[in-house]
């Protein structure tokens, strides 16, 4: 897909990006930056562990919007922030998504903003997993992925390659360009 196509598809779209605690969180910064440059209104929600890898300030600067990270901080308006974000989203993208977060989604658990938004959102959801290959191949993770897919959640990746743990295997988060293509496909079908 050409860069010009992305401008046409993403201009004016309301997108929420959920970022989980993974080394791959740095790739999410590029994803958010590109979406903002295409004219999307991008809002970011982070788990506390994601904020250990990448600063919320980076996402605030790239998205030009406040970042939801602290579940117990007073919301900017009367509505709980996870509800505001789920109402806002035309598409909810979780990149990177950890095994823990995928498990939360599949089991209806909401210990953080990223999971709480998932439970409340009515828009399409796209997940870009990132984890060690042994974790990805674990029967529990695969059961959760299958359950989510059967219920309409879309996945992009993971890819095979060098992982942060020093081995090579399937578990790398897809590149931002691949995630953008998967997002564009969802918008084209809706």
Image (spheres, grey):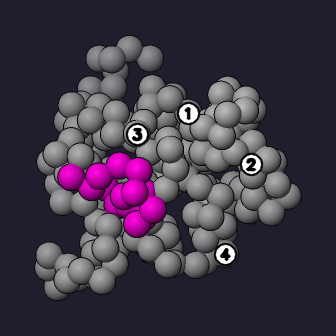
Relative vertical location of residue 79 with respect to residue 131 in this rendering, above or below: below
Q: CA distance from mark 3 to mark 4?
A: 27 Å
Q: Residue furthest top?
A: 2
Dot placed on the residue nearer the N-terminal end, 2 or 4: 4
Residue 109 part of the magenta segment: no
Q: Which residues are magenta?
A: 43-57
Task: Please give the label number shown on residue 26.
Answer: 3
Residues packed near mark 3 inside 10 Å, few (<14), some (14 to 19) or many (20 plus): some
Q: Position of residue 177 (x, y in %)?
A: 45, 26
Q: Judge from the rendering whether residue 178 lies leftward or rightward of residue 38; answer left or right.
A: right
Question: Contact (CB < 8 A) between labels 3 and 1?
Answer: no
On-image quarter of the N terminus: top left
Work out whether residue 190 can be spotted.
no
Q: Which residue: 49% across, 78% down?
A: 111
- Name the secondary structure under disc 1: loop
**Which label lies toward us, 3 or 2?**
3
Q: Disc 1 marks which residue? A: 174
Q: Residue furthest right?
A: 139
- Name the secondary structure under disc 3: helix
Q: Judge from the rendering whether residue 44 lies leftward or rightward of residue 165; answer left or right.
A: left
Q: Disc 4 marks which residue? A: 107
Q: Which residue: 40% across, 66% down?
A: 48
Along the line of sight, the residue nearer the viewer: 157 or 90: 157
């Amino acid at each position: 897909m050409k860069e010009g196509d992305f401008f046409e598809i993403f201009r004016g779209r309301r997108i929420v990006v959920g970022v989980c605690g993974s080394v791959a969180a740095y790739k999410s910064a590029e994803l958010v930056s590109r979406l903002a440059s295409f004219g999307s209104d991008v809002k970011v929600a982070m788990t506390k562990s994601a904020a250990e890898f990448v600063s919320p300030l980076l996402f605030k600067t790239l998205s030009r919007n406040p970042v939801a990270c602290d579940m117990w901080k007073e919301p900017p308006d009367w509505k709980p922030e996870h509800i505001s974000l789920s109402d806002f989203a035309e598409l909810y993208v979780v990149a990177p998504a950890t095994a823990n977060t995928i498990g939360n989604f599949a089991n209806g658990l909401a210990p953080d903003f990223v999971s709480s938004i998932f439970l409340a959102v009515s828009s399409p959801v796209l997940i870009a997993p990132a984890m060690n290959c042994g974790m990805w191949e674990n029967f529990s993770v695969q059961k959760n992925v299958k359950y989510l897919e059967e219920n309409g959640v879309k996945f992009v990746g993971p890819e095979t390659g060098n992982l942060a743990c020093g081995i090579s295997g399937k578990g790398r988060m897809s590149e931002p360009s691949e995630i953008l293509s998967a997002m564009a496909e969802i918008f084209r079908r809706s």
